Image: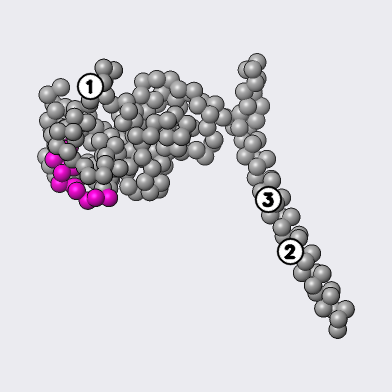
Amino acid sequence: MPEMEDAKISASKEHRITRRRFILGVIAGGAVVGAASYKILSPGGRTRGAGERWITLNVNGRMRRVEVMRQETLAWTLRYKLGLTGTKLGCDRAECGACTVLIDDVPHYSCSVLTNTVRGKRVTTIEGLAGADGTLHPVQQAVVDEQGFQCAFCMSGFIMSAVGFLKKHPAPTRTELAHGISGNLCRCQDYNKILDAMMRGAEYMRRA
């Protein structure tokens, strides 16, 4: 029947429109909820909202005021909010180690650490290793001397892992050091040269 066909077409159109409106409503609702999770700071210091938006971080010995989302990772904050691009984003799921930083001198994958959780802690990135006069950290200098990396995308993560490990194990064997930095992956797979550089770095740290 033509009347039944017309009714089916009309119902189908109504279903599509309703579905579209539903999706738009969900998106709009998510935006409202996301906005409500912030703490908005007014000029007078009054706050509103259920969460926090502005926090202060201790990064490389400096107190940095930064605006973050609740679900924001430390890697994202360091790279895109504070401009510390030495921290690399590789896998972004805590597997490659390219984003490794030190939190209270302990290596962590910054892609799996929420920025909100490091308030009151000391965060050190690759940019914070060198001295105030520009003198390289012993492990950094060892990498230069040994030419330990090819593309060097993973280099900062390896250096941060090695520095954290060597703080607690200053005189490791090659096997022990390999195990200590085994959470980091090299795309070029030049692990022998990397270990040569890290072992030289351990030697330099003992001399320092």
The mark that comes first in sequence, 3 or 2, is: 2
Distance CA(mark 1)–CA(mark 3): 53 Å
Q: Are marks 3 and 2 in contact (CB under 8 Å)?
A: no
Judged from the image, the secondary structure of the residue bearing numbered disc 2 is: helix
- Image quarter hosting the N terminus: bottom right
Q: Which residue is mark 1?
A: 135
Q: Which residue is mark 3?
A: 26
- Image quarter hosting the C terminus: top left
Q: Which residue is mark 2?
A: 16
Neighbours of disc 2 within 10 Å: few (<14), some (14-19), many (20+): few
Left or right placement of residue 106 versus residue 14 in this view? left
Identified at 49% across, 23% down, the residue is 65
Q: Main secondary structure of the magenta part?
A: helix
The mark that comes first in sequence, 1 or 2, is: 2
Q: What amino acid does circle 3 point to?
A: Val
Identified at 32% across, 25% down, the residue is 128
Judged from the image, the secondary structure of the residue bearing numbered disc 3 is: helix
Distance CA(mark 3)–CA(mark 2): 15 Å
Left or right placement of residue 26 versus residue 154 in this view? right
Question: Residue 135, how many percent across, how many down?
Answer: 22, 21
User: Is 19 within the magenta?
Assistant: no
Question: Residue 139, how many percent across, how many down?
Answer: 20, 31
Q: Which residues are magenta?
A: 187-198
When asked about the image quadrant of residue 17, the answer is: bottom right
Question: Residue 33, how many percent across, how many down?
Answer: 65, 40
Identified at 62% across, 39% down, the residue is 34
Residue at the farthest right position: 3
Q: Are marks 1 and 3 in contact (CB under 8 Å)?
A: no
